[in-house]
Amino acid sequence: MTVRLDDLDRKILVQLQEDGGQSLDDIAKAVGSSKTPVWNRIRKMREGGVIRQQTYLLDAEALGFEACFFVLIRTSEHDASWQGQFLNALNARPEVMEAHRLAGDIDYILKVRVANARAYDVFYQALISEVKVHNVTALLSMEEIKSTTMLPI
C-alpha cells in the first residue's frame, strides 16, 4: 500500500520523531489540527508502513555501554549459506545496533555498543568462532558528535 503524504502528515511525522510519547492533543495542537484527524492520519501511516514502530531512545552511556565500535568486515565468502550464517550471528547479538552491507573494499560495517574494550573482545571472539571472515578492523569512537534517528522530512 502506497501512502501519499501531504504537509499535515509530514508535520505529524516531525512531531512523532521529536517525541513519540506526546499525547494526541499535544501533536494536534503543534500541527494546527484536532485530535481525531491526527489519530486517523497516524493510523493510516502505520497501516501503510510509513510508521514502523513506536519506541524509546535510551542513553547508552547512562546504562553502562560506554564503548561504541565501528567494525569493518571483509570476507572472501559470498554464497547464500555464509550470508545466512552471518545474518543469524548478527541477529543473535544484541551488541550489534546496526549492520550494513557495503559497496567497495569493505563488505560490511557494524555499529557495536559494549561496556568496554574487554566486552568488545568477547563479542569479537564469539563472532569469529561462528562465522569465517577474512579481515576485521575495529574502530573505537572517541566522541559521538551527532546521532539522530530523525529523517529530514
Image (tube, rainbow, N blue to C red):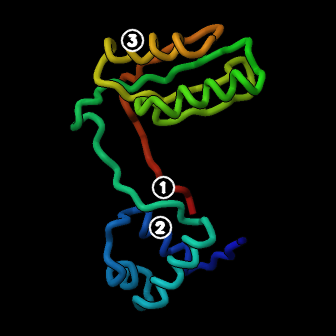
Q: Going 33% across and 14% down the picture, which residue do you hit?
A: 117
For label 3, the SS is: helix
Q: Going 48% across and 31% down the picture, which residue do you hit?
A: 92
Q: Going 48% across and 75% down the picture, which residue do you hit?
A: 12
Residue 37 lies, with reference to residue 51, above or below; the image says below
**Measured from the top left, where is residue 143 in percent x and y?**
36, 28
Q: Is residue 114 left or right of residue 39?
A: left
**Kind of residue indicated by mark 3:** Asp
Mark 1, residue position: 150
Cα–Cα span, label 3 and label 2: 39 Å
Q: Nearer the viewer, residue 70 or 123?
A: 123
Q: Are marks 2 and 1 in contact (CB under 8 Å)?
A: yes
Mark 2, residue position: 14
Q: Are marks 1 and 3 in contact (CB under 8 Å)?
A: no
Mark 3, residue position: 121
> Which image quadrant is residue 125 in?
top left
Quadrant in which the C terminus is drawn = bottom right
**Neighbours of disc 1 within 10 Å: few (<14), some (14-19), many (20+):** few
Residue 99 lies, with reference to residue 59, above or below; the image says above
Cα–Cα span, label 1 and label 3: 31 Å
**Measured from the top left, where is residue 97 in percent x and y?**
46, 36
For label 1, the SS is: loop
